[in-house]
Image (cartoon, grey):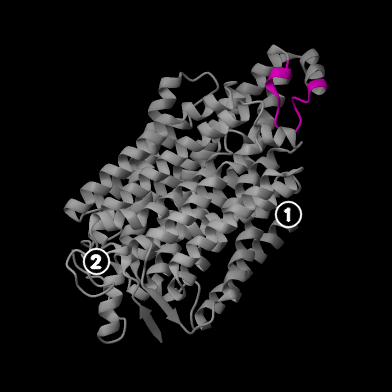
Amino acid sequence: MATTTPAGVGGGHAKHGGQDGGAPMTHRQIMEALSGLLLGMFVAILSSTIVSNALPEIISDLHGSQSSYTWVVTASLLAMTASTPLWGKLSDLFSKKLLVQIALIVYVAGSVVAGLSQNTGTLIACRAIQGIGVGGLSALAQIIMAAMISPRERGRYSGYLGATFAVATVGGPLLGGVITDTDWLGWRWCFYVGVPFAVIALIVLQKTLKLPVVKRDVKVDWLGAFFISASVTLLLVWVTLAGKNYDWISWQTYAMVGGSIALGAIFVLVESKASEPIIPLRLFRNKTITLSSAASLFVGVAMFSGTVFFSQYFQLARGKSPTMSGVMTIPMITGLFLSSTISGQIITKTGRWKAWLVSGGVLLTAGLGLLGTMRYDTPYWHLAVYMALVGLGMGMMMQNLVLCTQNQVAPKDLGAASSVVTFFRSLGGAVGVSALGAVLGHRVTDYVKDGIAALGPQAAAAAAKSGGSGGGIPKLDAMPAPLRTVVESAYGHGVGDVFLYAAPCALLAFVLTLFIKEVALQGRSGAAAAAGASSGSEEKETAPQGG
């Protein structure tokens, strides 16, 4: 049984002065309520991107390997992935405002301790804690927007979310690069710099975000959360270690993949019996939700591979500084910024979104395919065009996959449905980064060995002295010129291979979007629909099934 306590959304009276939670909010009220939320999202994305250009130096200082490099990224993605459905379900049961504040506090705690890390193990653990906080912020931002704003209007405000994502994505690497290149700061400040923003976001949220508080007397599905986390974790550990610690076809592979599938099956069984499942299985009876979730999985692979591996390419294949690595990704971020804001505005005016999804799939696939051709000496203007295509595609697909899902569910499932799509996107990112990181490590090692063999015995001796053929992140400045060229060429070719593997994933996402049926966007917010549902019969509101 659910009860709703009105809280005067946005801190003022709504435009048409109707019932609490039922009347539409003015643009000013929405922007006031969103200000702290967008700042929280900025902090979340900043934490994910600020370390990207600093990572080669961080891993080198902490004496880590390519596997450590991958896991610093993957740990955060894994925790974000596993916790996203739980945050979504909690938002259907408890105060969304309180939950988003808790997520910020978890993020701050993880960040502070990460900055004090003395080895890669501690850093990876802290990144996991950060990921739990970021999972809450990314899931709750979409959910709170859905509670306040109708799907028809949400395209416009999703554009602001996309713009925030773009600014943090370009600002993070740039800021991380500057911090890393500044002697009196150093890379540890990459973890501290987001803390003041998080504190400000907490204060702003407390003052501006006011939502109806829904209280339900139910238990949280902790068992489901455990089994889905265990299943995903085991799969990622296998992907990271396979091919290095054991063969891809080996008893370890059978044990770990089999174990992951078994844990996944137990999760499905638990969800089918839970009174309040973390991921309600009945949601997947809706074709749009199923297709959007699957498409998000493949978009995640493409999206995170684009942001994670560029820093290694620019620093280790082209010898650029961390700051310049950030500057050189600006075309991708510009594309993301433009497509997310422009598509959001047009969707709000027309109520139509499918053309943007399909176009995004085409652009993302083309951009990744072209990036697959890059080498260490590819002209930068070629890369800039390819990156812009990837950015345009991501901006059109990311928010709109969530939007078309939110448009199809009853108010009581808004949080769970939103977080399901975000979950699959994060899962795709975590598996993609882990798998593609393993591919990069293997390819670079092979290309370095081939390059050294081509140079002759003297170069091989020099490589052994400088550690050029080892498994760690190389320091290019310490290498003799011929060996440095070999390593740069190996990373250029290796990162190109990564994008070549990511391109088919974007193609699959594109194909899936073709089968999503377009349903015109609704004109009522989640909170308004919930208010209507609670005053009428049971909460059975669903989206119209025709265009």
In this view, the residue in front, 166 or 435, is: 166
245 in relation to 332, above or below: below
Residue 5 locus on image (x, y percent): 37, 78
Magenta stretch, residue numbers:
465-479
Number of marks in the rendered image: 2
Q: Which element is circle 2 on?
A: loop
Rendered view: 59 above or below 162: above
**Element marked by disc 1:** loop
Provide the residue designation for mark 2. Answer: 13
Quarter containing the N terminus: bottom left
Q: Position of residue 261 (x, y in %)?
A: 61, 66
- In the image, 355 versus 404, the foreground residue is 404
Q: Residue at x 59, y 39 (%)?
A: 51
Q: Is residue 249 visible?
A: yes
Q: CA distance from mark 2 to mark 1?
A: 65 Å
Residue type at mark 2? His
Q: In the shown orientation, is residue 96 left or right of residue 159?
A: right
Drawn side of residue 227 relative to residue 163, left or right: right
Residue 461 counted in the magenta span:
no
Is tag 2's residue or tag 1's residue first in the polypeptide sequence? 2
Q: Which residue is mark 1?
A: 250
